Image (cartoon, rainbow, N blue to C red):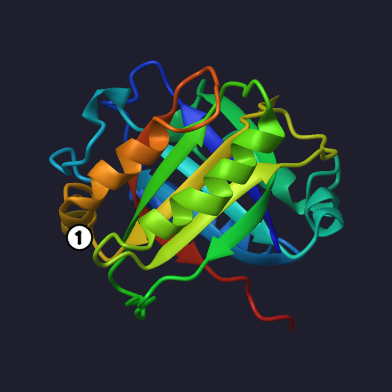
Amino acid sequence: MSVSYFVFFVTPSAAETRVAGAEIDALCDVLRTVRGLVEGLVFTPAPADTKHPFPDDGPPPPLALQLRFRTLPDLEATLRRDGDLQRVAEAGLLRSLAGAAVTQQAMMTRSFAVADPGAAAPDRPRCSYLVHYPGAAEDLNAWLAHYVDHHPAIMARFPGVREIEIYTRVDWIDAMPWTRVAHMQRNKLVFDSPQALSAALLSPVIREMRADFHSFPRFTGGNLHYPMMTRVVSPAAPP
């Protein structure tokens, strides 16, 4: 299993905030130079008319990152005071997000098989459904065991789903200037487009998901769901 590092940028007017395309390009250029990075995912909001089952969760963050590393030490090396990821936090890189509240969390990545992963087109970003559970479970071990044993099998029945990942907590060391959070779990579903995401998540499979949700062990804090366009960043080849 790999380690995923999540960074969420949130502004008071998230519904109106859009990150300039040139800033996203500059961010991707920085990410390509991060040593140890296996893959970077840059998330920006899907079109506002993207239909999904939980539209009342509020506007999505204007920008989020998922940075994948093979091991926790690989990630921690980039988060040191002299680490490569400090460049992402430098003033001026993301001017559109000046003053944004930024949260970070390192998590273990659990991947699950799907019927047809398909092949992503380089010029056509896929659409991801990001979900997180920020609260606490009465018995976290029982909660995670139920979720991992039951929910992915239902997710895999969504038509057109290309990826399923579940993320669970780890302890990590960092020197980033951002707020650490300890969400008990996150997960991600990936589809070819916003239209494919909507068709899948509004299919009858969602009723099975809701039925399983009501059998979860007790927890607090609810959950949040965001459809996000997804740009993949591959590390630069070593010289």
x then y, percent, for residue 75: 78, 53
For the question of whether residue 136 can be seen, the reply is yes
Residue 206 position, x and y percent, is 25, 45
Q: Nearer the viewer, residue 206 or 38?
A: 206
Residue 68 located left or right of residue 80: left
Q: Residue at x 26, y 32 (%)?
A: 54
Q: Amino acid at mark 1?
A: Ala
The residue closer to the viewer here, 227 or 136, is 136
Q: Quadrant of residue 12?
A: top left
Residue 48 drawn above or below residue 197:
above
Left or right of 194? Residue 126 is: right
Q: Residues within 10 Å of mark 1 (few under 14, many from 20)?
A: some
Residue 16 image position (x, y, % from top left): 26, 26
Q: Residue furthest bottom?
A: 239
- Most foreground residue, 146 or 38: 146
On screen, residue 213 above or below 195: above
Q: Is 44 positioned to the left or the right of 107 in the image?
A: left
- Residue 126, above or below 15: below
Please name the residue shown 54% across and 44% down the image: 147
How many marks the image carries: the answer is: 1
Q: Which residue is mark 1?
A: 196
Which quadrant of the structure image shows residue 146? top right
Q: Quadrant of residue 63?
A: top left
State which quarter of the image contains the N terminus. Answer: bottom right
Question: For the point 48% across and 70% down, which residue is it?
Answer: 113
- Vertical placement of 41 versus 207: above or below? below
Q: Secondary structure at mark 1?
A: helix
